[in-house]
Amino acid sequence: MSEPRLIKNVIITGKIRTVTGLHIGGNKGELKIGGTDNPIIADNDGRPYIPGSSLKGKMRSLLEFSLGKVKEDGSVHSCGDENCPICTIFGSSYEDFKNGPTRLIVRDARLPKGEKPEVELKTENVINRLSGKAAHPRIMERVPPGVAFEMEMVYGIYKEGDYDGLKHVFQAMSLLQDSYLGGSGSRGYGKVAFEDISLKVKTVEDYSSAEAGRIVNIGGKSTFSVGELLSGFEEVKSKIME
Ligand SMILES: [Zn+2]
């Protein structure tokens, strides 16, 4: 087995648009006047964002379920098998994991510069289980539908097998579109859609010569939906391998 060595990075950019209200819980210690008891996570300027760890964790969990890799006790999967796509792509806690670095980096998804959507405060009634009456309402803060965050993920190719592994990343994105991000998903929160996805390939030579890399272009098209990346995966893969 050859030592893993960086061959190229595939930089996946695009938008994550909220289809329903999004609630990723923030720090209650930072409660502001006129606020809510369920704040969302926001940066220092009060702009909501989607932490890369939330996005990656959810994609990992959905892919674990789809591949039957969820452990019986429900804890995070980590098998250390160097052929395991979960451990290879999303990371393994095994110290002696022999398959090279975690392939996927997921950045925080931020709003475009200067944009700051009005967050919504939504009042939800909580039913008292014994009396059946509405207890004190809970005020949930959320990002409204229709807000687009800028996403970036970097997928490293270290071995030939990593080209096929990229399909798992697209599968995880597809699974996420039919699941949810953040809290209260079973009550309709957190539906998101990926839009205008573009793929930039930067080889290890590009890095040494400060070249910008090349955008994957198929039939004059350079932005794709998740469905197109999956259905056209063989062509996408061959463009990345060029
Ligand atoms: Zn594994």
Image: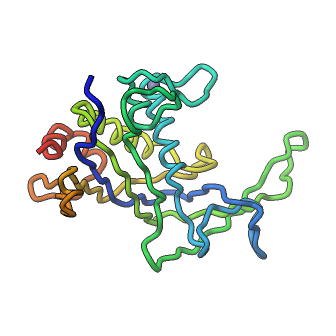
Tally the numbered discs.
0
Q: Is residue 62 left or right of residue 88?
A: right
Q: Position of residue 176 (x, y in %)?
A: 45, 44
The part of the image, by quadrant, that contains residue 123 is bottom right
Identified at 13% across, 46% down, the residue is: 239
**Residue nearest the viewer, comparing 231 with 197:** 197
Q: Nearer the viewer, residue 24 or 125?
A: 24
In which quadrant of the rendered image does the C terminus lie?
Answer: top left
Left or right: residue 155 compared with residue 23: left
Residue name at image x 52 percent, y 46 percent: 180
Q: Quadrant of ligand 1?
A: top left
Name the quadrant containing residue 241.
top left
Q: Nearer the viewer, residue 97 or 17?
A: 97
The location of residue 33, given as percent across then percent down, is: 78, 76
Task: Judge whether 1 appears above or below 157 on screen.
Answer: above
For residue 46, side relative to residue 233 (left or right): right
Task: Tell me the quarter of the image containing the N terminus.
Answer: top left
* Placement of 186 over or under 46, stated as above or below: above
59 in relation to 116, above or below: above
Between 160 and 140, the one lying in front of the other is 160
Q: Position of residue 79 (x, y in %)?
A: 49, 22
Q: Position of residue 201 (x, y in %)?
A: 21, 52
The colour scheme used to paint the residues is rainbow
**Which residue extends farthest bottom?**
114
Residue in the picture at 73% in, 57% down: 124
Side (left or right) of 129 relative to 87: right
Instruction: Name which residue lies at 42% across and 46% down.
Output: 177
